[in-house]
Every structure is written in structure tokens, then in C-alpha cells.
Image (cartoon, rainbow, N blue to C red):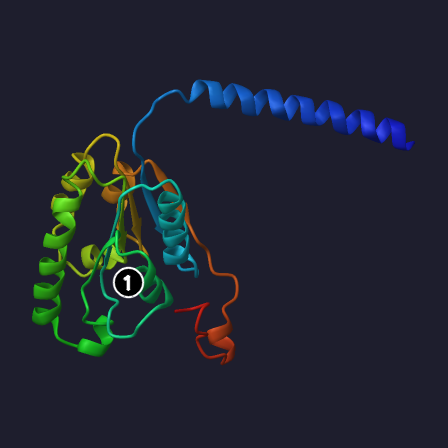
Amino acid sequence: MTDSRKDARHKAAMAKQKARVDANIEAADTQRGVAVLLTGNGKGKSSSAFGMVMRALGYDQKVGVVQFIKGQQLSGEEIYLREHCPQVEFHQMGTGFTWDTQDRSGDIAAAQATWEKARPMLQDPAFDLVVLDELTYMIAYNYLDAADIIAAIRSRPAQQSVVVTGRGGGAELQEVMDTVSEVKELKHAFKAGVAARKGVDF
């Protein structure tokens, strides 16, 4: 096949694709916040959520971040937000991983106290974006009431977007979310004996 024929076929294929994309864009005419769940066993769920934090800040939007589980070991996102983005309301459960604490009652109390930081954000129309990092584990471990969380997400201000990260979360949480993305692990350096990397893993 000659280059000119390849170019003509490519142009025709791209024209069809553009028509489909343009039609989908025109059909998506509802303006409201979205609820996003980033789940799965692969690496990158929190990283993706913090990418959306950066996007929102680029538009001078008001952002709230609540991290469940994490908090004993500093992370790059925490350092950056605390030092360079004082306008971001940032809270952490601060207990570290549940397998480190081994204190169910203490973890439940910490989860509930942290949820009480998140709940007002989900009721405040001033927040354009709220990130609830690792929240799904609080549901899986029965530290927090799933129905309460789902009701708060469902009844949040119309223009507010919320991002929830963590493995699982259950079918009811998935049902209330607008976008659900599953990050699947194919390989992980840690399983090959490579230590977690500052700036990549934390």
C-alpha cells in the first residue's frame, strides 16, 4: 500500500473517531460534581487522587484532603501540601497502618474522629474537591458505617466532586459513584525485593 493510500485511510479513520468524540462531548451536557472511586490491588490510587488535587489547585479551586490509615510516616504529598499549599484543608487519621497499631478499639475511635473532619467538607459548597484517601478500608474493617458514608456522598453539594481511594469498598459504594476505576497490579517492585522509593511510593 502506498503512503498516500495509508494517509487517506488514516485521515478517514480519524475523521470517524472525531465525529464519535464530538457527539459524546455534545451529549454530555450536565454540569455537576462527580464522585470517583479509585480501587483495585494495583499501585497508583492515591497518586491519581493527588493528581486531581493538583488539577483543582491549578484552577484555584478549594480542596479538602482527608487521609485514613496513613499518617505516621511522612509522605511527599503531605510535605508538599503542608509547605506549599496552606489553602488546602488537610487532615490525617495519624495512626499509621492497622497491622502496626493492632488496636481495633483505638483505630475505630481514630477513624470516627477523622470522619468527623471529612463530614463537614462534604456538606460545604465552598469545597470544589474532597479527597477521602484510603476510606474504603474503614468500610471493609467496619470502623465506619458504610450507609453513613454513602449518604454523605450522595447528599453533598451538587457542584462538589469527591474522590475515594482504597481497595474494595463494596457494591453499594460503587453504585453511588459516577466513575469507578480499578487499578490492577501486573508487577510490583516490592515483591522482587526492591524497597519502597521516596518520591515514588511515599
Q: Nearer the viewer, residue 177 or 119?
A: 119
Residue 171 percent coordinates (x, y): 27, 44
Q: Is residue 37 left or right of residue 22?
A: left
Q: Nearer the viewer, residue 51 or 19?
A: 51
* Residue at 7%, 64% in the rendered image: 109
The answer to whether residue 8 is above or below residue 79 is: above
Q: Amino acid at mark 1?
A: Arg
* Residue at 13%, 54% in the rendered image: 117
Judged from the image, the secondary structure of the residue bearing numbered disc 1 is helix
Residue 122 percent coordinates (x, y): 17, 42
Residue 93 percent coordinates (x, y): 18, 64
Q: Is residue 185 left or right of residue 133?
A: right
Quadrant position of the N terminus in the picture:
top right
Does any portion of residue 40 appear in the rendered image? Answer: no
Quadrant position of the C terminus in the picture:
bottom left
Residue 80 percent coordinates (x, y): 35, 63
Q: Within 10 Å of the Cα at label 1, are there few (<14), some (14-19), or many (20+) other Cα atoms?
A: some
Where on the picture, by quarter, is residue 180?
top left
* Residue at 39%, 55% in the rendered image: 45
* Residue at 27%, 39% in the rendered image: 128
The mark total stands at 1
Q: Is residue 120 left or right of residue 185?
A: left
Q: Which residue is mark 1?
A: 82
